[in-house]
Image (tube, rainbow, N blue to C red):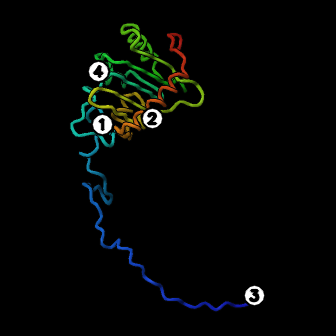
Amino acid sequence: MLARRHLTHQPVRRVNTGFAKLKPVSSPTVRRGSLLYPEESMLRTLFGDGCAVVVGLPKNFDVSAALRSAKEVRLASAFAHVSGWKHLKGDVEASSGDIFLLTGLQYNQTDPALLKDWLQLKLSHGDRVNVNLAAQSPFFHPKVLIVGSPKRKFAVVGSGNLSNGGLRTNCECGVYVDDVQTVVTLCRWFDAQFRRWRAPDLADD
């Protein structure tokens, strides 16, 4: 038989951590039913009204002006549609910088009309526009925009593809970063992916 152990109750010592003196930092919230959400005015998209929010956008941030003044634009999207490209097209075409556009073909989600538009852009703007299709393996699934301009170098990394839904109407979440080392690291990552390319062809549609 197992010997019965006698349990004794030891007094619990209270440790003073000092946490009670700290006041929680509050942030503006709105209540919907029984749940609290961040104040909607704090969450914005890159392109007007919508649900595809980007956290951390600077006050009065203007992505159109940033693209037009950019010296370099790098865009990677798992798939791409004309509906999303239309939000960037005019500003990218107006830029005098180097443009690098990268998308994938998995599940045939990328719009053939978009590829034709990118190829026309390359033909009309020469060597400063570079268009590639991502390698088929491993599965290509990023959504990254990197912009380098004289005033600002930044990146937006998120969940939304280059589509109207991904940039505006879907429930998406991205993060704006302008830390120099992080942006440099993202550029190196992008360039490595870009080198694993194959050039798009009109036969891809």
Quarter of the image where one finds residue 154: top left
- Is there a contact, CB below 8 Å, between mark 3 and mark 4? no
Name the residue beneath numbered marker 4. Answer: 91
Nearest the camera: 149 or 159?
149
Decide which of tag 4 and tag 1 comes sooner along the chain: 1
Name the residue beneath numbered marker 1. Answer: 45
Instruction: Label 4: state its secondary structure.
Output: helix
Image side of residue 18 versus residue 189, left or right: left
Instruction: Label 3: state its secondary structure.
Output: loop
Please report the residue visible at 49 percent of the width from the left and 88 percent of the height from the top.
Answer: 11
Amino acid, disc 1: Thr
Separation of marks 3 and 1 at Cα, in angstroms = 67 Å
Decide which of tag 2 and tag 1 comes sooner along the chain: 1
Instruction: Label 2: state its secondary structure.
Output: helix
* 168 in relation to 12, above or below: above
**Mark 4 surroundings: few (<14), some (14-19) or many (≥20) residues within 10 A:** some
Residue 2: which numbered mark, if any?
3
- Is there a contact, CB below 8 Å, between mark 3 and mark 1? no
Please report the residue visible at 55 percent of the width from the left and 22 percent of the height from the top.
Answer: 196
Residue 185: which numbered mark, if any?
2
Amino acid, disc 3: Leu
Q: Position of residue 187 (x, y in %)?
A: 44, 30
Which quadrant of the figure contains the N terminus? bottom right
Separation of marks 2 and 3 at Cα, in angstroms = 62 Å
Nearest the camera: 59 or 70?
70
Amino acid, disc 4: Asp
